[in-house]
Image (cartoon, helix red, strand yellow):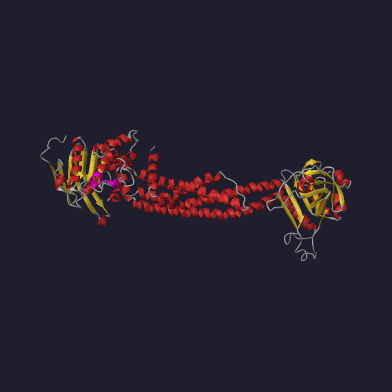
Amino acid sequence: MIRLEGISKLYGVPPQEMRALSGVDLSIENGEYVAIMGPSGSGKSTLLNILGCLDQATDGRYVLEERDVSTLKDKALSSLRNEVLGFVFQQFHLLSRLSVIKNVLLPLIYAPEYPSNAMEKGTAALSSVGLEHKRTAKPGELSGGQQQRVAIARALINEPSILLADEPTGNLDRQSGREILDIFKKLNREGRTVIMVTHDPEVAKESDRVVVIEDGKIVSDQSGPKEEGEGE
Amino acid sequence: MRIGRLFREGMTALGSNRPQTFLMALGTIVGIGALTVILFISAGTQRQVAKKAERFGARAIVIIPAHGRMSQAVGGKSGETKMELADKQAIASQIEGLEGIAASASKSQPLKAGSTQTTCLVDAVEANWHHIWDWPVESGSPITQTDVDQLDRVCVLGLTPKTELFGDADPIGTKILIGKVWFTVKGVLASRGITGTGHDRDRRIVIPFSTGMRRLFNQQHISMIRVKVKEGVDLDETAQSIEALIHQRHQIDPSIEKIFTVFSTNSLVKRFKGVSESVSRLLIALCGLSFLVGGLVLMNIMLISVAERKTEIGVRRALGAARRDILLQFLTEAVAVNGIGLVLGWCLGMLTAWIIARFTQIPVAPSGLSLVLGGMFSVGVALVFGLQPARRAANLDPVEAIR
């Protein structure tokens, strides 16, 4: 469960500071599929980074899984990113010198215990995105859609409860984008919380709830009609 | 272990850019190479000096007249300054802490045994010569006090004239002609081998002092005085007192000119150490310089690498790497680079040491210290110069890095 209370984010030094977020309140229950929309520069990426514990708010309270994230230090934040959160980026961000399976296993390096069945886990994660046959390929040999699927497998390897995606279809053609969105849908149905930043209304339609942000403030927060009441 | 995983991460990064890794390791390779050579030479020199000191004899002081070039200026003497038995007696009676003192006179003489001829240094020695020189006979008997007292015409052969005159045959009891006098061989000296400068120590014959002075050389002056000091007596101090005494006896101020050379086991060791130390100092400077340059190269390439791998660092942070993990990954990378440098540098050093040993007179001996010190230096350089790039990597803002 995610709870943001009065979250503000300021950049720069006081006289010329820039306010990316001002007093954002937001609650997301487990298992929700939330799209965050807004024009560029609205603060939606900043919000996602704060949700993902990559960035910390200047002001306000952030409670994630009953822990007050605002007071946590680097080490605790890192283990949250490692164990509770999974990231998917617009640019995929796979390490080109590593094979597909090594990329998928990457988060395990930072896990408290390296599982003895890492290879099986990695293969399972790859097959959940339909790419187990590409285990030994290098990312450069894959299409954009395939690369993004590997990135999703990587995000899933530590079985996080929350998936964070920043424009995951932004660099893909329609067909590949569709596949990625189907995977997110499936993962959400399996019980994972999915939070996705997008500027594409078509993509946002996939979600159960659309949060619109402008100038660092939430201007609209609507739950979609189709799956209402299924949130909890 | 987590650090093990981080180390493997670093290694894959190194393996993927070999030329860069080599460049990073270059300074360490040269540094470790130089260090290895230095330590090998230093070990070789130490061994050589120890051998020299052992050959020269422990607790020994030798006094020889240097042929006075400036003696004319001081006191108007000309030619060779001669040392006499009185000098030996003065040292024996006025210097304390001596275990023994032996004078000898030496001259090169023709030898003849049967039809075989050779030339050899003949030492006319006192009976305690064998003890003072730590030079026993290998077979037969040594020169005795009775030989000296009775002006006996006996001799003890060094190994070289023995071999040249008699081959493998036993020479004891045989008569040989030294100069124009017949001597009976009574013993053969133990072998002392050839000096570093190629001088054959075994090319000598010892005869009783009195016989040499009166029957063979017909002279009054002696060539050398050798002193053995008692255990626990300060060798340098004794050598200084002897030097002062002998110059005073010949009315010469040793601070202006030294016409007698006095050297001891210590001064011999010092002289050789001095030579090797000046060479070592040069090499240590070279070694330190290459570590410094290597460290700076390492640091700069790592800084470039951190900038190039900014996105990777950001992604790793997003996937759960703490600052500490990134710091450790880059530090272990630096250590691994220098580990490679250590191995290659050691090979380079060994090769160089081998070439030096093979083609020069410089003594070389293997030194285990080169591994220990080399390991310490390469890890140290990696940690010192790798720290700043590693910290820069660790302190990157992940949001900025991924963008």
Q: How many marks?
A: 0
In this rendered view, identify the residue nearer to me: A75 or A116: A116
Q: Is residue B79 magenta?
A: no
| Residue that appears at 23% across and 54% down | A18
Look at the magenta stretch and give its main secondary structure.
Answer: helix
Q: Which residues are magenta?
A: A139-146
The answer to whether one can see residue B237 in this image is yes
Q: Where is the N terminus of chain B found, in terms of image quarters?
A: top left
Can you say whether B219 is above or below A184 in the image? below
The residue lying furthest to the left in this view is: A225
Q: Is residue B355 left or right of B20 when viewed as pictured?
A: right
The residue lying furthest to the top in this view is: A116
In this rendered view, identify the residue nearer to me: B328 or B91: B328
* Residue B4 location (% of width, % of height): 40, 39
* Residue B386 location (% of width, % of height): 42, 49
Q: Is residue A144 magenta?
A: yes
The residue lying furthest to the front in this view is: B115
Q: Is residue B289 left or right of A109 when viewed as pictured?
A: right
* Residue B58 location (% of width, % of height): 71, 45
Q: Is residue A86 left or right of B342 when viewed as pictured?
A: left
The answer to whether one can see residue A159 in this image is no
| Residue that appears at 47% across and 55% down | B293
* Residue B188 location (% of width, % of height): 79, 44
